[in-house]
Image (tube, rainbow, N blue to C red):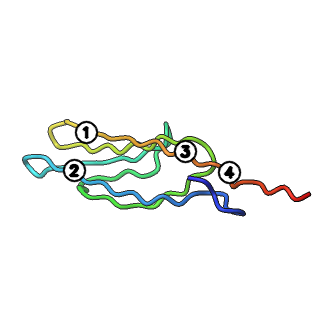
């Protein structure tokens, strides 16, 4: 993503879902690197919007079930600063 002139963050919409054979999901978490953005329990579907500043961000979503099993997926977003116009 490249920011528009004057913008300081990119707004990213994310969705995720998880199921298991017993329909017994117990928790989820969303992280940006080592920082937790959102976590909860007994949720199988998730939708959120996050605002990312300039930089490279690895967003990881993880879901857990009552049996202690988990699954996760990650995506990397690169947010570039707005182009600079040089007037001569």
Q: Quadrant of the C terminus?
A: bottom right
Instruction: Report how far apart the C-alphas of labels 3 and 2 lie in the structure.
Output: 26 Å
User: Can you identify the residue that label 3 sits on?
Assistant: 78
Query: Taking 57 as reference, is 81 left or right?
Result: right
Q: Is residue 75 above or below residue 38?
A: above
Query: Taking 39 as reference, is 1 left or right?
Result: right
Task: List x then y, in percent, for residue 50.
Answer: 49, 57
Please say if the residues under marks 4 and 2 sit with CB atoms less than 8 Å apart. no
Q: Secondary structure at mark 4?
A: loop
Return the disc, 3 or 2, that comes first in the chain's sequence: 2
Please say if the residues under marks 1 and 2 sit with CB atoms less than 8 Å apart. yes
User: Can you identify the residue that label 1 sits on?
Assistant: 71
User: Can you identify the residue that label 4 sits on?
Assistant: 81
Please say if the residues under marks 3 and 4 sit with CB atoms less than 8 Å apart. no
Please say if the residues under marks 3 and 2 sit with CB atoms less than 8 Å apart. no
Q: Which residue is painted at 24% across and 38% down in the image?
A: 70
Q: Which residue is painted at 58% across and 48% down in the image?
A: 79
User: Can you identify the residue that label 2 sits on?
Assistant: 18
Task: List x then y, in percent, for residue 15.
Answer: 34, 57
């Amino acid at each position: 993503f490249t920011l528009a002139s004057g913008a300081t963050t990119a707004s990213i919409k994310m969705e995720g879902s998880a199921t298991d054979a017993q329909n017994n999901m117990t928790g989820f978490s969303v992280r940006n690197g080592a920082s937790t953005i959102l976590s909860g329990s007994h949720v199988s579907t998730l939708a959120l919007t996050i605002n990312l500043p300039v930089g490279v961000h690895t967003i990881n979503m993880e879901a857990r079930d009552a049996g202690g099993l988990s699954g996760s997926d990650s995506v990397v977003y690169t947010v570039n600063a707005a182009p600079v116009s040089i007037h001569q």
